[in-house]
Amino acid sequence: MLRFAALLAFVFLQLAAGVVGSPTPVAGLDKRAGACSFIRVRKEWRGLTASEKQNFISSVLCLQSRPAKITGKAGVKTRFDEFQACHIDLTDEVHQVGHFLAWHRHFITMFDKALRDECGFTGIMPYWDWSIDADASKAMKDSVIFDPSTGFGGDGVSGTYTLPPDPNGQSSAFPFAYKGCVRTGPFANQTVRLGPGRLVTEHCLVRGIDEASKQTLATSQVDRVMQLTPFEKFRPGLENGIAAGFGFGIHGGGHQAVGGEMLNPYSSPADPLFYLHHGNLDRLWWKWQRVDRAARMYDISGPTTQRPPFTNVTLDFQMTFTTLGPLVPVREVMDTETQPSCFVYQ
């Protein structure tokens, strides 16, 4: 794989209820997949009530226990495994390409839908605004996101995990990031069956929180990315960073902050925080689009593959999601206020 980030959001009452009104069309640009009957409002983790947080955590635990819909794929036993397997299989096709943001937007939408349809999730799909933690004086490891009672559990415990043999170079692991098993919080007993990388091994959820990520995720760095135009500058700036010395960029920086499996370019969706991290990246793209809806809502560019021969991505490019669902054209996910997305960010 090539570089993975150089290493690897109608009125007040409606917002409070997580629903807003009908979207405003972009004249001359819409080929809408379908109007939304209602639009959910995604919120930052800290903006959820205690019951909303528990609803989300319980639904993720449910998906980790529900049998997979597919059979015969090594290491895939649960629906949660299926999502991780999809990302592993497509890593080289959906990073360092023009549809990087579009693919991950729909990937999260499918995860949200699975939680609702299969696990009774009725709450709000959250995101993690790591800039709040990066700007704070306290350590990243002390973020509320890692709280063992109201969050996703803490750091890995040193000495509790050893990387498996990798004679064929399939792990794509950064050894320093695999500190140890998570021993606190709701995912302390999680069984990960895929990874590191493309290996199939049964292990714990591994983390290695990296305090150095704070400088990469600070609001000042995010602001630099948000000022980039057009999309062909914004896209790589968000995924990889702006210039030498900019660290891993905000994409890689979020993965780096959690460490462990989250810093693996292939198997990172083993950690439920993957979905909140990419939710925040999607929120930033959503905000960038809405600065100039006419010019940016359907602005897409970049190669469809990591290696030549290169073809530029278009709105009609068909994105694959392996066994999770049918092909989806890029056009259908550009405006989140239309089907199949139907959400905005707070």
Image: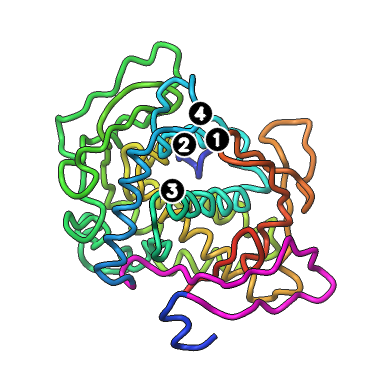
Q: Residues within 10 Å of mark 4 (few under 14, many from 20)?
A: few
x and y, in percent, of residue 267 in the image:
43, 34
Q: Is residue 247 magenta?
A: no
The secondary structure type at the circle numbered 2 is: loop
Residue at which label 2 appears:
265
Q: Quadrant of residue 50?
A: bottom left
User: Residue drawn at (44%, 20%), measured in percent from left and top?
Assistant: 74
Tell me the tag on residue 186.
Answer: none
Asked if the residue under mark 2 is in contact with the one under mark 4, i.e. CB atoms within 8 Å, the reply is: no
Residue kind at label 1, given as amino acid type: Thr
The correct choice, above or below, for 164 with respect to 239 in the image is above
Residue at which label 4 appears:
70
| Region of the chain picked out in magenta, as a range | 19-47
- Spatial CA span between label 3 and label 1: 26 Å
Residue at which label 1 appears:
91
N-term-proximal mark, 4 vs 3:
4
x and y, in percent, of residue 65 in the image:
33, 38
